[in-house]
Amino acid sequence: MRTPGADFELAAGFLYCEGIVKHRDDILRISYCVDSNRDGEQRYNIVNVNLREELTPDLQPLEGHFFTSSACGICGKASLEALRLRGCSVMSDAMEVSTDVIYSLSEQLRSAQSVFSTTGGIHAAGLFVF
């Protein structure tokens, strides 16, 4: 389940969180389905991801046992340790962000949510680079 939009980013994030890819360079191409046997509307509900040829992920542990949701990436994991085991780096203790910047992030996120402004009914996540 997902609200349409940012489908490629959602697919890439899912593959990263499941440990299938470790770096952005592992993904060669992401595209919508172009299978003429599919109903035209459904083509945009299927995303194809092409990985580097030498990357051979072990998909067997994931077979029929996973789902994605609109929850944050941590909600699907049993603990923060599960993210560390996947190789997710820990932020440096030396990073500092001013209070003014922290207070401005909510409005920056809201200004990028045009569908939320109309419906009031979707979730969002934001990535802010400092």
Image (cartoon, helix red, strand yellow):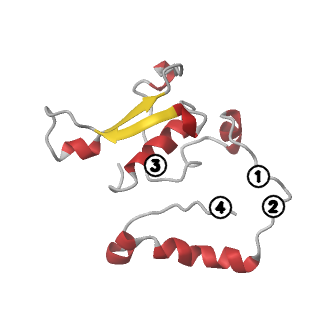
Q: Amino acid at mark 1?
A: Met
Gap in angstroms between the C-alphas marked 3 and 2: 26 Å
Of the numbered discs 4 and 1, the one sitting upstream in the chain is 1
Q: Quadrant of residue 116?
A: bottom left
Please report contact status of discs 2 and 4: CB closer than 8 Å, yes or no.
no
Residue to which mark 3 is pinned: 9
Of the numbered discs 3 and 1, the one sitting upstream in the chain is 3
Gap in angstroms between the C-alphas marked 2 and 1: 7 Å
**Disc 3 packing (10 Å; few <14; some 14–19; many ≥20):** few
Please report contact status of discs 3 and 2: CB closer than 8 Å, yes or no.
no
Residue to which mark 2 is pinned: 95
Of the numbered discs 3 and 2, the one sitting upstream in the chain is 3
The residue at 63%/78% (across/down) is 104
Q: Amino acid at mark 3?
A: Glu
Please report contact status of discs 4 and 1: CB closer than 8 Å, yes or no.
no
Residue to which mark 1 is pinned: 91
Q: Amino acid at mark 4?
A: Val
Q: Which quarter of the rendering shows the C terminus?
A: bottom right
Q: Secondary structure at mark 3?
A: helix
Gap in angstroms between the C-alphas marked 3 and 1: 22 Å
Q: Secondary structure at mark 1?
A: loop
Image location of residue 114, percent across then percent down: 38, 72
Residue to which mark 4 is pinned: 129
Observer-nearest residue: 128 or 3? 128
